[in-house]
Image (cartoon, rainbow, N blue to C red):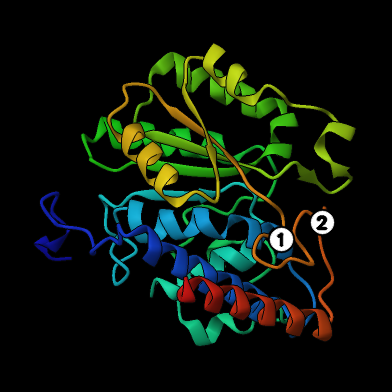
Amino acid sequence: MSNVNSRDRQPALRVRDPAQLASIARSLRRDVIDLVAPTGQGYVQQGLGAADLFAVLYFAELRLDPADSDWPDRDRFLLSTAHNTAIFYATLAARGIVDPVAVRDYCRDGSPFEINASERVGTAIEATLGSLGQGLSVGIGMALSARRRLSPSRVYVVLGDGELQEGQLWEAALFAGSAGISNLCLIVDDNRMQVEGHIDRVVSVAPIAGKFRAFGWAVEEVDGHDIPALLAALERARGCHKPTCLVAATMAGKGVPSLEGLLAHNLKLPPEIAAEALTALDETHGGEERK
């Protein structure tokens, strides 16, 4: 490998315009529908809800090189909710990190683009996760490694609010706060949904922010669909001397009125609903352009 992987190397150009990022997020929502529609299987509601988070992370925040996913000083991204792959794969394809044609085989037999993200896809997937609650522990190991190597790399972990019911996660959170792992940023996708329904009807995890603060983290509560607020919160996290937790409130099904707020963990997507969703996204886009 050549010297292009030096620490002076500049990451690919980032998008900082909120309007452009909002347009990217809308496109990602369409891609989620397009990926899930052929088989009717996939995590539609979570993907639509997290589209703004993924647009901001992959197009504005992460230091990466789409042409070289092995760049040693890249930022690391871990999807602890590893089943939320429709939005993850759609983002990787839109960012030029994986082949957009290959992604069309999502959830088909033999495809590496399985419903749970794994390293079969390639080095763009930093770790095979899926046993909920483990992503933060893996991310802490990566962040410690980067710190010991004096690397500028940061580690970003996205997990669901339902994962906060896992005991391992709190052991990891306690360690990260105690060790002051400042190159670690955790984003809680707070959509209040898990497989059994509303999170409060299973095991309430509130107050999320208060718990992480008590464990020594810097915490911000943010609207997960407010792109300027997300950009500002992530910028503050980069200058923080503690690990940061962003509690991002998102709406399941965001962008498709008939699906918004519907707590369907693994929504079946028949063709007529997919067509309706795409029409709604197109109408929303056109209406916003006319403002």
In the image, farthest residue toward the front: 291
Residue 189: x and y in percent read 61, 44
Badge 2: how crowded within 10 Å, few (<14), some, or many (20+)? some
Image quadrant in which you'd find residue 58: bottom left
On the picture, is 159 further left or further right than 149? Answer: right
The residue shown at (31%, 21%) is: 241
Residue 107: x and y in percent read 71, 76
The residue shown at (46%, 54%) is: 126
Image quadrant in which you'd find residue 282: bottom right
* Closest to the observer, 122 or 160: 160
Residue holding disc 1: 253
Residue 100: x and y in percent read 49, 82
In three-dimensional space, the C-alpha distance between marks 2 and 1, rounded to whole angstroms, equals 7 Å
Badge 1: how crowded within 10 Å, few (<14), some, or many (20+)? many
Q: Do the residues labelled 2 and 1 touch (CB within 8 Å)?
A: yes
Residue type beneath disc 1 = Gly
Q: Is residue 128 visible?
A: yes
Image quadrant in which you'd find residue 64: bottom left
Residue 105: x and y in percent read 64, 83
Secondary structure type for disc 1: loop
Mark sitting on residue 262: 2
Q: Can residue 112 be seen in this view?
A: no
> Going from the N terminus, do you reach mark 2 or mark 1 first?
1
Looking at the image, residue 65 lies above or below residue 62: below
